[in-house]
Image: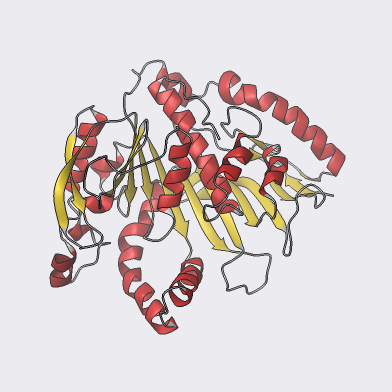
Amino acid sequence: MSSISATTPRSTLKVNRNAAIQQRRSGMAGVQVVSRKSTVSASRVSLETQAAKDVVVIGLAADSGCGKSTFMRRITSLFGGKPEPPEGGNPDSNTLLSEITTVVCLDDYHCLDRTGRKEKGVTALDPAAQDFDLMYNQTKDISDGKSIDKPIYNHVTGLLDPAETIAPSPIYVIEGLHPFYDERVRDLLDFKIYLDISDEVKFAWKIQRDMAERGHSLESIKASIDSRKPDFDAYIDPQKKFADIIIQVLPTQLIPDDNEGKILRVRMIQKEGVDNFDPVYLYDEGSTISWIPCGRKLTCSYPGIKFFYGPDTYYGQEVSVLEMDGQFDKLEELIYVESHLSNTSTKFYGEITQQMLKHASFPGSNNGTGLFQTLCGLKVRELYEQVASKEVEAASV
């Protein structure tokens, strides 16, 4: 049976399984209406006085090797079409285009190539290696509906290749190391997402990849991580305070002293009071919930699965936190978890589970990484519909 403990702002209570089911049914019945119709928040009201935007700009920040590409594939798939490089263009282009989305890698705004960075003694994480003026001007041009001639940073050669022409699209995503660093660029963004991978998980992932697949030594892996850390701490990590959603990946708390990084605790930190965004919640909005799902309905081997939801503060701002620790054995059973979540921005019951099954081969599909990336993508879709005043059909399987 499920195990649930819940703390409301005024009282602490233990909820047995039958009571929880009744609470979920009554709550879920009203949530779809509250989320989309009844609750006309200040952010929704403001839309009545604003013209619909032709281009919605999304920012995704994260360190290298933290899963930005997988995240982008999850998001863009919700809008239909398969992301592809510009047809007939540079085969080493970093840009991905689909039916209504454009994803641009901010490495293209390096002002120093690989040799130039080495000569000046700076890393790619250092703002001195970025052309923020060009990044701002071109992002603004796209936002204003104008085409741009964007540079290409060639990750194979380390050189800056000739520019490619990019036309505006309904959804324009900039992803990379510095999307929130420059205030001018940050102010152009309609929604901001940060992938926050803990040092322990980064280290475990690099060991798994670089030792097992590339034959690197433990010492060389540690040296590589340590060489990047000062610039990461100085220039990349502080950007997360500007994000509307932070997906935080941490070591599990279900296994004492775990250092393998195979079982993950993932937190989706959702900022309150953001225009056109209602945080996802578990069971009862605003309460503090700890939930161990029923083992008969959600198959999971050792060490099991535990969920948490509750209010918190993050960099002095009010947030709602949704957390999952552990991993799924059978993705099709995720429907059981989905039925307990509200404000998910799905178009039909089971859409989260459908999307997770559709991308079952993607990294993180059996844990909170894939689940929260999917939820985040659904929020981006809903935000686009509200800001652009356009309806997006549910993506086919």
Q: How is the image coloured?
A: secondary structure
Q: Residue at x 49, y 68 (%)?
A: 205
Quadrant for residue 345, please give it: top right
Foreground residue among 337 and 186: 337
Q: Residue furthest top?
A: 48
Quadrant, the C terminus: top right
Q: Residue at x 45, y 32 (%)?
A: 79
Q: Residue at x 50, y 51 (%)?
A: 247
Q: Position of residue 356 (x, y in %)?
A: 59, 44
Foreground residue among 11 and 213: 213
Foreground residue among 150 and 11: 150
- Asked whether, in this view, residue 234 is left or right of residue 333, the answer is left
Quadrant for residue 111, please give it: bottom left
- Asked whether, in this view, residue 340 is left or right of residue 164, the answer is right
Foreground residue among 387 and 93: 93
Q: Position of residue 322 (x, y in %)?
A: 60, 47
Q: Position of residue 143 (x, y in %)?
A: 26, 31
Task: Give the answer, above or below, for where 357 lies relative to 362.
Answer: above
Task: Give the answer, above or below, for where 146 lies relative to 102.
Answer: above
Residue 312 visible somewhere in the drawing: no
Quadrant for residue 8, please give it: top right
Residue 47 visible somewhere in the drawing: yes
Task: Give the answer, above or below, for where 76 lies relative to 294.
Answer: above
Task: Give the answer, above or below, for where 187 lies relative to 322.
Answer: above
- Asked whether, in this view, residue 131 is left or right of residue 74, the answer is left
- Asked whether, in this view, residue 106 is left or right of residue 1, the answer is left
Q: Residue furthest front?
A: 88
Badge count: 0
Q: Position of residue 396 (x, y in %)?
A: 53, 31
